[in-house]
Amino acid sequence: MSLKRLVLGGEGGQGVQTVAEVLAEAGYRSGLESLYIPSFGVEQRGGVSLAFVQLGDEPIAAPRFQKADVVVALSDRALERTAGYVGRHSIFIYESSAAPDPARLPRDTGRILPLPAVRLVSEGLHPRVFNILILGALVEVVGMVGSDEIKRALEDRLGYRFVRQPELRELNLRALEMGQEAARELLRRAQN
């Protein structure tokens, strides 16, 4: 299984840090070595937010890395900020609903997966669970963390909201599943 390095980037308020935190917690619950490092400016909303996650079955030697196994860009500005972490063997996932200029996408990468997350949540869910759909896609692409661990970590992180709004739990679980299904389909298409 070895080690997976991930970089997630998005606009402040898109939930990048929540995705990274839940993924790292689920990795830890799965018995993996797990490291999460947030990186954002002084702005809470309006700035680009980056998160770095490492998951593995061996000790993590260093908190920093040059290239990631999986890079996620949820906005045009995040695409610019994460491009340097894309390598020849990286899987690059980008939010495709806004259809960025193809010339701006990284060229030297293993696979590019256009995930229409905004469209998916607006058609069948709620924009509020956009980041959980992204989390589901990452669970599928990374393949190191089980669904039960993700659900428990999600419950730990957002459970207080679920108590106040019980329907939010079901909405988040549907978004998680929808993200996994979307990633499975993208991976299948990328292999053909």
Image (cartoon, helix red, strand yellow):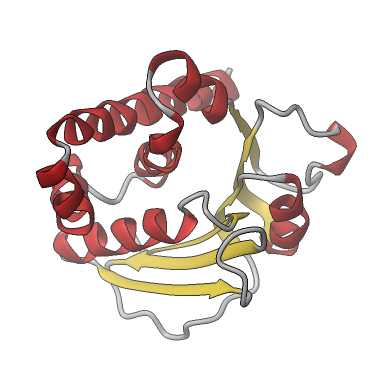
Residue 3 locus on image (x, y percent): 40, 65
Q: Quadrant of the N terminus?
A: bottom left
On screen, 188 above or below 91? Answer: above
Please report the residue visible at 23 percent of the width from the left and 66 percent of the height from the top.
32
Residue 134 drawn at (x, y percent): 45, 40
Q: Residue furthest bottom?
A: 62
Residue in the image at 52% along x and 29% along y: 117
Query: At which x and y percent is residue 38?
Result: 48, 73
Against 33, is 93 above or below? above
Percent from the top left, x then y, of residue 62? 47, 85
The image shows a total of numbered marks equal to: 0
Give residue 45's quadrant in the image: bottom right
Up-down relation of residue 14 to residue 22 (above or below): above
Q: Is residue 82 left or right of residue 68?
A: right
**Left or right of 51 on screen, residue 96:** right
Q: Residue at x 79, y 42 (%)?
A: 105
Q: Nearer the viewer, residue 173 or 70?
A: 173
Compared across the picture, whether 179 is left or right of 91 comes to left
Position of 147 compared to 118: left or right? left
Image vertical order of residue 28 relative to residue 103, above or below:
below
